[in-house]
Amino acid sequence: MISFESDYIAGAHPQILKRLAETNLETLSGYGTDSYCESAREKIRAACGCPQADVEFLVGGTQANSVIISTMLRDFEGVVAAKTGHVSIHEAGAIEFTGHKVLELPQKDGKIEPSVLKKFMEDFYADGNHEHMVFPGMVYISHPTEYGTLYTKKELTDIAAVCRSYQIPLFMDGARLGYGLMSRGTDLTLEEIAKLCDVFYIGGTKVGALCGEAVVFTKQNRPAHFMTSVKKRGALLAKGRLLGIQFDALFTDGLYFEISRHAIEAAERMKEIFKRAGLAFYLESPTNQQFIILENSRLELLQKDIAVSFWEKYDETHTVVRFATSWSTTDEQLDKLEAMLLPGSGAREA
């Protein structure tokens, strides 16, 4: 059995494990105050071209989303997100649990359209009863989106302009940010994201780390007593070194980008296999997640040897499934996928 189920099914990149082992017996202060966390912060600031950024390390994506949103919003505010956004559907109500509503917008290929956001904001303040309503206090986007799609530089610039005009922060969920940055179809850089977003995070869990996300506040806008709020919400890791060491390794000699590029190259080969096999794409994804429509009978047969993720029911006889590549995807795994989908193609079976 081989797996394309997700990009965090393997442990961690060997270089990260090596650094964790090398530093294991060092005695270091806790809660992210150690030298490795500070080194990682400096490297991330440099990579973002944002020397004034405040960088904090949290253990996972849901914790990052929940803590960032709940500490930056006032008690009468909610967060605007696409209907398909991770905070809307796949975080078990974590945002609502903090007392803040997710204000859903229609989406197109997983993205919020700037014009739709602008109209939503205009309509809200034009409503004579808006004082009785949950105020839009932040905009949440994910890049790549839940469907592996990407915002263009113009789209992000236009969304940021709407946010600035209403004086609300723009928050980017970057759980898979590396794959967006290394995509062949992107025109956005890390420096531009840092310039346009008020806060974003660089995902580690899904890009080679055992766990961890690096939260970047770009406008000297980190909420007061942020660490205290993180601890109050049960998201503070006592052995903060574990996160710092991993991000220090990821941002040494371009490892984060190397990992991401490898996954993109594997996904591009995977796409070619799917096309040659005549499979239907649910949508066009330029990142490491690929969404394919399969007949249920064919899916059942495939799953005997290959693990994939159910995404959604397409119709009575077809299912949308996700294939994901990562740092651990090998040529041998892709050879086996090719041999299964294209028997007789001459692909070397793993």
Image (spheres, helix red, strand yellow):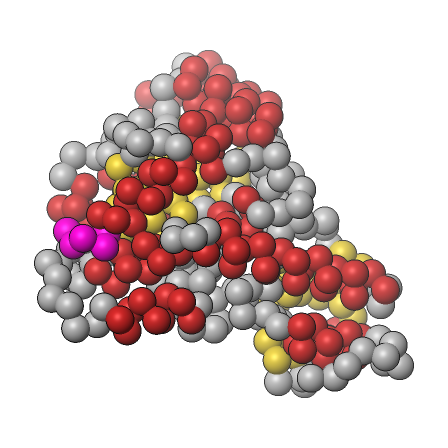
Q: Looking at the image, can residue 217 be seen?
A: yes
Picture residue at 39% right of the left edge, 51% below the top: 251
Figure check: 3 above or below 130: below
Instruction: Tell me the chief SS of the magenta region.
Output: helix
Picture residue at 67% right of the left edge, 42% below the top: 185
Picture quadrant of residue 52: top left
| Residue 232 in the figure: left or right of residue 270 | left
**The N terminus appears in which quarter of the rendering?**
bottom right
Picture quadrant of residue 316: bottom right
Picture residue at 31% right of the left edge, 67% below the top: 19
Picture residue at 12% right of the left edge, 61% below the top: 28
- Give the residues in magenta: 33-37
**For residue 36: magenta?**
yes
Residue 144 location in percent, x, y?
55, 46
For this orientation, the residue located farthest to the front is 253
Q: Looking at the image, can residue 63 be seen?
A: no
**For residue 78: magenta?**
no
Towards the viewer: 60 or 310:
60
Residue 170 location in percent, x, y?
41, 31
Picture quadrant of residue 197: top left
Figure check: 197 above or below 64: above
Figure check: 225 above or below 147: above
Residue 231 location in percent, x, y?
16, 53
Towards the viewer: 329 or 342:
329
Q: Count how many numbered circles sit on residues in the image.
A: 0
| Residue 70 in the figure: left or right of residue 308 | left
**The C terminus appears in which quarter of the rendering?**
bottom right
Residue 117 location in percent, x, y?
53, 26
